[in-house]
Amino acid sequence: MKQKIIIGLLAFSWVLAGALVYLHKDRVQLVKLPPESLAEWYKPLNKRHVWLHNMFKLRREMQAVRHYAALEQAEPLALWAGRLNDHYQEIRKMVPEWGGRLDQDSMRRLLNAQQENQYEQIDGLLGELQKSCDTCHTQFRTVTAALYRAPDFSKMQLRDSETLAETMKALNAQVNDIKIAIGANDQVWALNSLGDLKTGINEMGVLCESCHSFLPKTYPDEVVETALGELHTALVSGDRRQQGEALGKVAVSACAQCHGTHRIAYDTQQLINSKNGFIELLRH
């Protein structure tokens, strides 16, 4: 009797939990995390994004197999089909937990079709393989990119005692100082704040070079420099409309443009990595 009661309580708990999640479905988003073994094939644990490059190879090889099957050219078809199979099997070697997700049956049938010159079957078999790829991509591609391809800005510093987050808050405050000073017609405050903003932006540029070293000066680029120059001119002239327009250009080119790439990716990374305890889940 006791056992039936316990089983009944457990079943009721699961039903209740499911009902609560469903009732709050507009506020709950379930995200599946990839196996921890995947991290081994991305930076910083690896020198290169090995997993990503294997995906590039597979995409290129599937395209080549389809191309040579359509042309019925046996020799290059055999070459690319062999490469496709090799890199497809690399998936389970690198991440054994995903070995069961591979469509080995379709791969075997594709290789048989290639060996027997059954060219008309290959396009359909490639479509079957693509379905197995799409299943994983739907569940894991976005999360994996956020986890392993977005820089971890939390560890970056501009000065010995100032984190990047603190620097960004200071830059934001300086932009707002300029806006407030314009409204108060306080030219001295506005120009001093602009000077501090320029200094902070140039210091940020040094940090940007640590990742963007292969490009010309990334930040501040010519657009940002021009916007800052226009803002200085407008603050000196005292034209309120020009001041507002110039400040808007600075905010877009020096702040929003980078945030559109880096901040979205970084915030998503931090959200995925956050560990919610039982109390946090109940609050949610």
Image (spheres, helix red, strand yellow):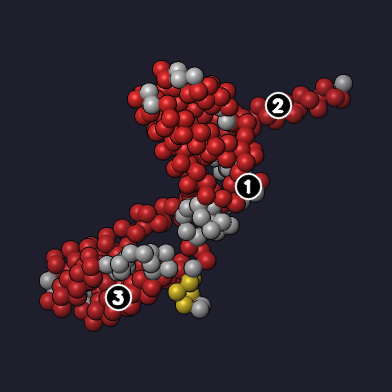
- Mark 1: which secondary structure? helix
Left or right: residue 6 compared with residue 98: right
Q: Amino acid at mark 1?
A: Ser
Question: What is the CA distance from the residue labelled 3 to the residue labelled 2?
Answer: 61 Å
Q: Name the residue at 47% across, 30% down.
A: 78
Q: Marks 1 and 3, how far apart in space?
A: 43 Å
Q: Nearer the viewer, mark 1 or mark 2?
A: 1
Q: Residue at x 18, y 63 (%)?
A: 245
Q: Determine whether the residue tagged by mark 2 lies in a helix, strand or loop.
A: helix
The residue wearing badge 2 is 12
For the residue pair 139 and 210, the one nearer the viewer reads as 210
Q: Residue at x 30, y 67 (%)?
A: 216
Residue 172, given in percent of the width and then of the height, sits at 36, 67
Q: Upstream in the sequence, badge 3 or badge 2?
A: 2
How far across and how far down the image is residue 154, in percent?
Answer: 51, 64
Q: Are marks 1 and 3 in contact (CB under 8 Å)?
A: no
Q: Earlier in the sequence, mark 1 or mark 3?
A: 1
Count of numbered badges drawn on the protein: 3
In the image, which is nearer the foreground, mark 1 or mark 3?
Answer: 1
The residue under label 1 is 37
Q: Height in image: 127 above or below 161?
A: above
Q: Amino acid at mark 2?
A: Phe
Q: Which residue is mark 3?
A: 198
At mark 3, the secondary structure is helix
Quarter that holds the N terminus: top right
